[in-house]
Image (tube, rainbow, N blue to C red):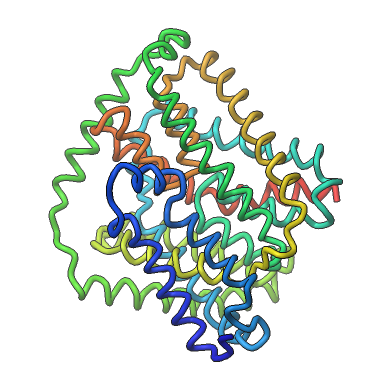
Amino acid sequence: MIKDGFMYIAALVFIAAMLVNLPKIFKGKKAGAFFKFAPPIVLIYLGLMLLCTVRLWDLEATAPAYNAMKNPLLYAMLFIMLLRCDLRKIIKLGPKMLIGFFSATVSIAIGFVVSYAIMHGALGKGAWQSLGALCGSWMGGGGNMLAIQAALLVDEGAMAYALVMDSICATLYVMFLLWVIGFHERFNRWTKADTSVIDEVGAALEAEAKANTKPLTWQNIAILLGAGLLVSAVCQKFGGAVAGTLTFFDKATWTVLIVTLLGVLLAMTPFGKLKGTEEISNVLLYVVIALIASRADLASMGNAPMWLLTGLIILLIHIAFMLVLAKVFRLDIFTCAVASLANIGGTATAPVLAGTYSSALVPVGIIMALLGFAIGTGGGLVVAQIMSIFG
């Protein structure tokens, strides 16, 4: 059993790194099919939760190391990831893309509220906090979930059900969307959608991405990592000072909001164009995910079926709303599917789905996913407060 804090952190980072590299180690059709169903981030969730359950490390002895590392790395990751979210580019998506995206966001929010109203008695007391964190993930990405968990002070053990629900339901939903995109011609005829604007935007964005040929250098990695850690440290201090004056949010919430504002603003400056933001933010994301999963004990998860049913209800409500809105606004299947997955799957899966429709539209999937990340934290916090009404 690991009791040393540094050994605990080192083991988590190494295990996460090994799991992320599995798709490169194991290749072939069977391996590819497996990793489509269980991508590395899912394996990190489940693998480290399992290792926690078998007590590979002492939870009490390693708690100081966990507490010292999780939130600082989380805020640094949030800042660096947001540097990729240039709001000026998002405007180019056009009104229908934005309608599709926000339709998906609102329908997911409605799904969470309605499903919690139905299932809250079976989920246990205070489940709205865990679901609120998961709602942030399903509006944006894993970083939003971690940010909301920190803001709402959700216990790691309380997140266990939400993590399993996220892993299983979201993975199955990605597979469903990859299948349904093949019926784009039939769907577009049903909604009477015009796809000419989407094709033009996709081609323009792809050309812009190819024009950025600057290499990734170690100097870029150093400045981005240093800036992320410094922003994390300063914003924690500033968040505490603001919380002392404006008490309607606590320190964690103010820190998240300040980091988000800085990231979005700097994304529109030359600093946001530095190569390395994706690579560093992904590394930090997997490390923070590993830290979170390492504190969840699977032995206490006897109520998982009720959480999985809740996730299914959320997705069914979301799909029903999207079908109605697609017919009303004449949205094409690409807009609906990528908008949906940009919310639920984030930057890891939305570009993949976009690429199955047209390789020229992969940048659109990325930008939509980044928009989800920009609003996911705030949206999840709002939904969490609404769900708290039901107890």
- Report the number of numbered marks: 0
Q: Is 49 positioned to the left or the right of 83 in the image?
A: right
Query: Looking at the picture, does residue 328 appear above or below residue 44?
Result: above
In the figure, residue 364 lies in which quadrant? top left
Residue 321, given in percent of the width and then of the height, sits at 61, 24
Of residues 232 and 338, the one drawn nearer to the viewer in this rendering: 338
Residue at the image position 60 percent from the left and 80 percent from the top: 67
Residue 120, given in percent of the width and then of the height, sits at 82, 45
Residue at the image position 48 percent from the left and 58 percent from the top: 43
Q: Is 144 positioned to the left or the right of 264 in the image?
A: right
Query: Looking at this rendering, what residue extends furthest in the bottom direction?
Result: 4
Residue 115, given in percent of the width and then of the height, sits at 74, 38
Residue at the image position 29 percent from the left and 59 percent from the top: 25
Q: Quadrant of the N terminus?
A: bottom right
Query: Looking at the picture, does residue 269 appear above or below residue 62?
Result: above
Residue 387, given in percent of the width and then of the height, sits at 77, 46
Query: Looking at the picture, does residue 123 appear above or below residue 254?
Result: above
Residue at the image position 42 percent from the left and 56 percent from the top: 40
Of residues 329 and 341, the one drawn nearer to the viewer in this rendering: 341
In the figure, residue 306 lies in which quadrant? top right
